[in-house]
Image: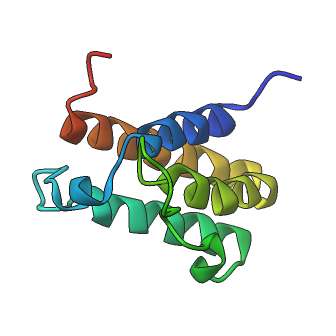
Amino acid sequence: MEPSALERAIARLAASFSEVTEGDLALPARADGATVGDLYRRAVERSAAVAGLDPALAGPAAPADDLYGGGYDVAYRRVARAAARATRAADAEALERDTAAWARDVDRALGLEDV
């Protein structure tokens, strides 16, 4: 089965979050002053709300032994997959659009937009 547009957007944002370290959380990501950390929290909170879950269920953001990134992708995927399963078709488009925008903003903040 081919992944939906929402599933592809979730995978892309998770890939972006896999590059984020604790020090990257304070990087400016958007003109409105939102940081990478703000976008991470928004993505987790929005996904949790769509799935009807407590955002705390995403678990710890960063495994202590992750040398290559902060593990933010792991925590995000926990709630984002649940959101994708729970999303009605009408809501999937809006969540996909927001998820894709967050991925672009995080990539830009990390200097990955041309990768």
Q: Residue furthest right?
A: 1
- Quarter of the image where one finds residue 57: bottom right
Q: How is the image coloured?
A: rainbow
Residue ID at (48%, 56%): 72
Q: Residue furthest top?
A: 114
**In the picture, which quadrant includes the C terminus?**
top left
Q: Position of residue 78 (x, y in %)?
A: 68, 60
User: Considering depth in this image, is 65 or 73 the residue closer to the camera?
Assistant: 65
User: Considering depth in this image, is 63 or 40 the residue closer to the camera?
Assistant: 63
* Left or right placement of residue 94 versus residue 70 in this view: right
* Left or right placement of residue 79 versus residue 106 in this view: right
User: Considering depth in this image, is 50 or 58 the residue closer to the camera?
Assistant: 58
**In the picture, which quadrant includes the N terminus?**
top right
User: Considering depth in this image, is 10 or 94 the residue closer to the camera?
Assistant: 10
Residue ID at (64%, 83%): 54
Q: Position of residue 6 (x, y in %)?
A: 64, 39
For residue 80, above or below residue 1? below
- Quarter of the image where one finds residue 103: top left
Q: Position of residue 104 (x, y in %)?
A: 33, 35
Q: Position of residue 5 (x, y in %)?
A: 64, 31
